[in-house]
Amino acid sequence: MKACVAIAILIVALGVVLSPSYNPRLQYTPIQSTAASKELTLLLSNLYWKIPYQTHVFDCSEMSGYLEVYLENHGYPTKIAVAEDFDDTGKSHAWLLVEVDDRSFVPVETEPLIAISPNNLIYDAYFAFDYMFESGKSAFFSMRAEFFMGNLSVEDVLGARLH
């Protein structure tokens, strides 16, 4: 009996460790225009991809993984969101949710590199996702084929314009 309980606990623990976070709705406060959101928008406007977008090779999933690392390294708590049917288009999509203030998230697209405004017609779609990951690494371990970041560093794929 004790062995069965121990195995059940192990299976649950492994499931928690190996499975992606599932949360179809994030409780959020739509941001208007705060200093933090303006700083994020400015930061994004100075970035560019060194590798061009290519479906199933270097697309929204890989770009989200690299950009998540970059933003975390610049002090922005960031999560990767994935929808299997983004905005009822029938296509899967990955993007970032960047916390700029307490429980205030800004959706960020990777191609083009932009913060999504609350005035965007599909703004709410960015908060309806199937999976949320803390990092590109956790996304890779859960959805291996979609989030392969290879041997490249953030600096290999993402550049910053000097002003």
Image (cartoon, rainbow, N blue to C red):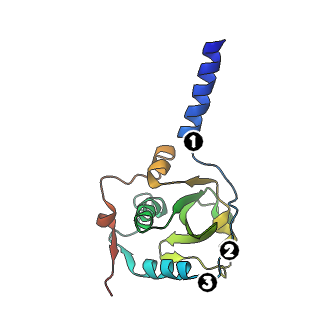
Q: Position of residue 132 (x, y in %)?
A: 58, 54
Query: In the picture, residue 63 is in which quadrant?
Result: bottom left
* 162 is higher (above) or lower (below) than 25: below
Which residue: 62% across, 68% down?
102
**Which numbered disc covers residue 112?**
none
The amino acid sitting under disc 1 is Ser
* Disc marking residue 19: 1
- Visible in this render: residue 145? no
Residue at image point 57% right, 41% down: 19
Count of labels in the image: 3
Residue plotted at (53% across, 71% down)? 108
Label whose residue precedes the other's in the sequence (2 or 1): 1
For label 1, the crowd category at 10 Å Cα-Cα, with few meaning under 14, some 14 to 19 and many 20 or more, is some
SS at mark 1 in the image:
loop
Q: Which residue reaches farthest top?
A: 1
**Circles 2 and 3: CB atoms closer than 8 Å:** no
Q: Disc 2 and disc 3: Cα gap in Å?
A: 10 Å
The percent coordinates of residue 81 (x first, y second) are 57, 59
Q: Write down the residue under mark 3.
A: 33
**Residue 10 appears in which quarter of the rendering?**
top right
CA gap between label 2 and label 1 equals 28 Å
Q: Is residue 109 above or below residue 69?
A: below
Q: Which residue is mark 2?
A: 30
